[in-house]
Image (tube, rainbow, N blue to C red):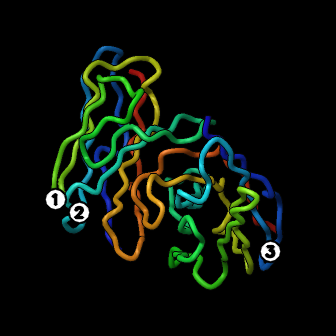
Amino acid sequence: EVQLVESGGGLVQPGGSLRLSCAASGFSFNDFGLSWVRQAPGKGLEWVSFISGRGDNTYYADSVKGRVTISRDNSKNTLVLQMRSLRVEDAAIYYCVRDRMETRVDRFDYWGQGTLVTVSS
Amino acid sequence: EIQMTQSPSSLSAYVGDRVTITCRASQSITTFLNWYQHRPGEAPKLLIYAASTLRSGVPSRFSGSGYGTDFTLTISSLQPEDFATYYCQQSYSTPPEPTFGQGTKLEIK
């Protein structure tokens, strides 16, 4: 059974940093691309970032480019999102999402339960 | 960025009704279109991919169609568990810049 379990969310002040993690199990981790998708309170879904199966290609939404770094450790089946210079508008539930493809975004076939990030002073 | 526009934004219907949600892309995305269901407090679920392919395990009352810029999601006979928010999402962009529609909230009448 595919499982994606996020952690690391919490309350942070504007301008602060936060590191989100996602522990994956139930599939061959390095065969699949992974994304972070977020949902701000009362808003819809927004893709944040993608990393290829081998970790050699990364992509970011314009809204987070330069402030966020996605990475993965294929030896530990773990996905990480390092966030810096956080803004109030970054507050959201962040979902760890598996893609059906290794090297490109195709379809998000498994989602974690999400971790809540709150940005407030 | 490819913009995705869903209509309606919200919809009220009875159990047993047939409902259709539409999704329009700002440019042709051929069939790079997926549909998701999102119930409150749960993780979103993939329902349909490549515009019309039903994901394994998804009930056959769900169907999708379309090509290019115009797409539809149809639920043939609403069940109580279908009341949720539905999102379309394009995966045509290269480099990847997937975008979602704003969502359609389906409520019980």
Query: Reading the chain from its start, which is encountered first: label 1 or label 2?
Result: 2
Q: Nearer the viewer, residue A30 or A81?
A: A30
Q: Label 1 to label 2, Cα distance in Å?
A: 5 Å
Percent x, y for residue B97? 42, 70
Q: Which residue is mark 1?
A: B68
> Mark 1 or mark 3: which is in front?
1
Q: Is residue A48 left or right of residue B89?
A: right
Mark 1, Cα crowd under 10 Å, few <14 / some 14-19 / many 20+, is: some
Residue A17, labelled with which disc? 3
Cβ–Cβ below 8 Å for labels 1 and 2? yes
Q: Closer to the camera: disc 2 or disc 3?
A: 2
Chain letter belonging to callout 2 = B
In this image, A20 relative to B88: left or right? right
Q: Residues within 10 Å of mark 3 (few under 14, many from 20)?
A: some
Q: Nearer the viewer, residue B109 or A104?
A: A104
Could you tell me the amino acid type at mark 3?
Answer: Ser
Residue drawn at x 24%, y 41% is: B52
Residue at image coords 19%, 60%: B30
Amino acid identity at mark 1? Gly
Query: Looking at the picture, how far across and down is residue B48, in whole percent?
Result: 34, 40
| Label disc, if present, on residue B29 of the rendered structure | 2
- Seen as rendered, the residue at the extreme bottom is A66
Callout 3: chain = A
Q: Amino acid at mark 2?
A: Ile
**What whole-number distance in Å separates the C-alpha atoms at marks 2 and 3?**
36 Å
